[in-house]
Amino acid sequence: MISSRRFLALAVVCTVLSIALLLGSWVSHSHSAATPPAKIIDAADFPNLQAAFDAVPEAGGLVKLPPGDFELTEPLRLRRENTRILGSGASTHLINRNEAGAPALILRHPNRDNDPKARLWRVQLADFRISGNSESGDGLLAEGMNEIYIHGLSVDHNGGHGMNLIDCYEDPRVSNSIITYNGKAGINIVKGHDIAVSANQLEENQDGVRCLDSYNLNLTGNVLDDHLRHGVVIENTYGSVLSGNMIEECRATAIILDRDCYGITVSANVIAHNLNGLDLRDAWGCTVSANTFTIIPGQALRVGPRSGRITITGNSFANSHIGERTRRKENYEAQWPALIHATGILLEDTSDVAITGNIFTGLIHEAIKAVGRPQRIAVVGNVSSDLGRLDSKRSEPFDLDSGGNVIGLNAKR
């Protein structure tokens, strides 16, 4: 039989638990009532796109953009996180009519002017087109966005960058988009971290992709063609990989590593008929492997005086030879893009470079040339043939000075 004291204690406990449950339910109900849930917004129900964007609740949601041309004279702004903007393919067309350098679309925390650390998280953009004019700004300007995801956009003819990602530090992703004819870079990334840029097509921008002051760029499987200056420019970035990209007919240089780059691998890319190929201007501890440098008339691969500790292995440097003949006529007097011939490696006063297992064929000069006083260069196990096509007197394929350099076990003809 339960004593009166134990019964009283049990009653008190039950009462406290009941009150706690009631309070918890009230707090939960009050919170949900004060904070509207995420929702689906059909932009067709609003007078304009900005009104639809402004209707996104604090919890975020999905904004569905209908087909049609949407002309903008000032930037369209998204100020909410956890939001996906979904178009109807290229038939959803944002047209920037601004001629004062303003972007078409801005993603930015509303308090960022007062708090530079203010950020938005998890914004996604998919399946619509952004275009501009020669006097407009960026197609997309995203600033202070974490985990931004851009997929399936068409971005073209903007006066600024196609996509400009500033301080989008955590995990920015750009994939399966086509970015063309923009006045500056197709994709410009500043202060990013763990960056994925994959399976995009970029054509006839000023530069293809720029990545500055960043970490861990993964640039894979992209097609870059006909850029008016450079293909890929990477500065002050480390721990990155460029792999499986096709970079063709850039008027200046296909790939540049500059300003304290280190720990970067450039591998399995096709670098075809750019004026210059890969320029290591300021790069350390990098690997260049299994790339194909075909008909690069300026300089296929340069290692500059502010670069060193470089591994160069398993690459092919070649002209347009297809067995019995050269497919493209080598006109040494032509101007770009009719300038067609092949070059090798230039070492400028660098140090600690291993060059192994490469093949050099059909070049206008030697395979490897050193200027200045390169130190500790090892050239071993390479193959060279049909060199000096422009020289009246053919020189040795591997032209190195002294300084602890080693040349050995190379096959040449």
Image (cartoon, rainbow, N blue to C red):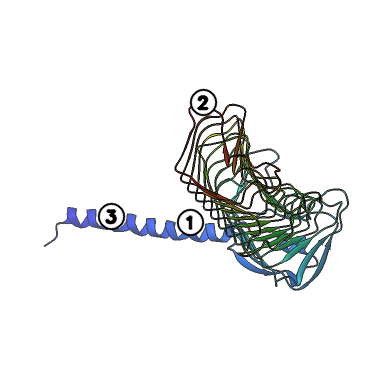
Cα separation between marks 3 and 2: 86 Å
Helix, strand or loop under label 3: helix
Badge 3 local density, few (<14 within 10 Å), some, or many (20+)? few
Tell me whether the residue at label 3 lies in contact with that at label 2, contact meaning CB atoms closer than 8 angstroms: no
Check disc 3 and report the residue beneath it.
13
Helix, strand or loop under label 2: loop
Helix, strand or loop under label 1: helix
x, y percentage for residue 312?
51, 44
Judging depth in this view, the residue of 293 and 362 nearest the camera is: 362
The number of discs equals 3
Badge 1 local density, few (<14 within 10 Å), some, or many (20+)? few
Judging depth in this view, the residue of 261 and 116 nearest the camera is: 261
Check disc 2 and report the residue beneath it.
403
x, y percentage for residue 259?
62, 34
Rendered residue at 80%/65% (across/down): 48
Amino acid on which disc 3 is placed: Val
Cα separation between marks 2 and 1: 76 Å
Q: Earlier in the sequence, mark 3 or mark 2?
A: 3
The quarter of the rendered structure image containing the N terminus is bottom left
Badge 2 local density, few (<14 within 10 Å), some, or many (20+)? few
Amino acid on which disc 2 is placed: Gly
x, y percentage for residue 257?
61, 41
x, y percentage for residue 212?
64, 41
Q: Mark 3 or 1, which is nearer the eye?
A: 1
Cα separation between marks 3 and 1: 21 Å
Q: Residue furthest front?
A: 393
Q: Earlier in the sequence, mark 2 or mark 1?
A: 1
Check disc 1 and report the residue beneath it.
27
Q: Earlier in the sequence, mark 3 or mark 1?
A: 3
Q: As displayed, is residue 110 above or below residue 84?
A: above
Amino acid on which disc 1 is placed: Val
